[in-house]
Image: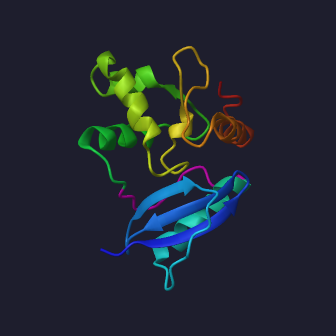
């Protein structure tokens, strides 16, 4: 199946979106320009629109068909991340418990760091058990920005 690419500017820098005809495969921060694909499938234009709405504060939940590549365990972790609501945080430990074992806490952190669909699969909402921001593939400054952004548009207030 063919992959299509689209780049967009965001308050956090350039984001490169990748999809097949029907599902979003990845959304990553990148400083490298890409050759955009002609005849983009609707999933890419929908993803760009929904991300722009998220950044403007008018969208708190994404409605996109996702198909990230990963191991079965990573897929389970990413599904748990999708359950963490806008404006809230959860610890790596809590995710591990939800998946059945505290012994998986480090593996949850590794899977979280390999999430190929930034922001939409909200790995930025996962923090340390002590409430501190730890680890984010896009950098801690972006993670802090995303959490503060969600706090501004959430009824729950400050997240961490």
Q: Main secondary structure of the magenta part?
A: loop
Residue 13 located within the stretch drawn in magenta? no
From this view, report whether residue 7 is shown above or below residue 156: below
Give the magenta range: 57-67
- Quadrant housing residue 100: top left
- Quadrant housing residue 149: top right
Residue 14 rendering spot, x and y as whole percentages: 65, 59
Residue 33 rendering spot, x and y as whole percentages: 62, 67
The residue sitting at 65% across, 28% down in the picture is: 159
The residue sitting at 39% across, 42% down in the picture is: 78
Residue 64 located within the stretch drawn in magenta? yes
Q: Is residue 70 left or right of residue 152?
A: left
Residue 19 rendering spot, x and y as whole percentages: 43, 67
Quarter the C terminus occupies: top right
How many numbered discs sit on the rendered protein? 0
Quarter the N terminus occupies: bottom left
Asked which colour scheme the image uses, the reply is: rainbow
Pick the residue in front: 49 or 145. 145
Pick the residue in front: 134 or 33. 33
Residue 117 rendering spot, x and y as whole percentages: 47, 52
Residue furthest bottom in the image: 39
Residue furthest left in the image: 72
Residue 50 visible at all: yes
From this view, report whether residue 21 is shown above or below residue 125: below
Residue furthest top in the image: 130
From this view, report whether residue 68 is shown above or below residue 145: below
The residue sitting at 66% across, 36% down in the picture is: 147
Residue 83 visible at all: no
């Amino acid at each position: 199946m063919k992959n299509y690419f689209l780049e967009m500017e965001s308050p956090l820098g350039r984001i490169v979106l990748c999809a097949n005809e029907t599902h979003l495969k990845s959304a990553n921060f990148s400083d490298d320009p890409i050759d955009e694909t002609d005849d983009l499938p609707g999933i890419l234009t929908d993803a760009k629109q929904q991300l722009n709405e998220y950044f403007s504060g008018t969208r708190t939940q994404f409605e996109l068909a996702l198909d990230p590549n990963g191991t079965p365990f990573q897929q389970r972790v990413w599904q748990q991340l999708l359950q963490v609501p806008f404006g809230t945080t959860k610890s790596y430990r809590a995710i591990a418990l939800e998946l059945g074992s505290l012994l998986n806490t480090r593996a949850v952190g590794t899977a979280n760091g390999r999430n190929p669909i930034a922001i939409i699969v909200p790995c930025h909402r996962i923090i340390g058990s002590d409430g501190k921001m730890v680890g984010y593939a896009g950098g801690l400054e972006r993670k802090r920005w995303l959490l503060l952004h969600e706090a501004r548009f959430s009824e729950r207030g400050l997240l961490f």
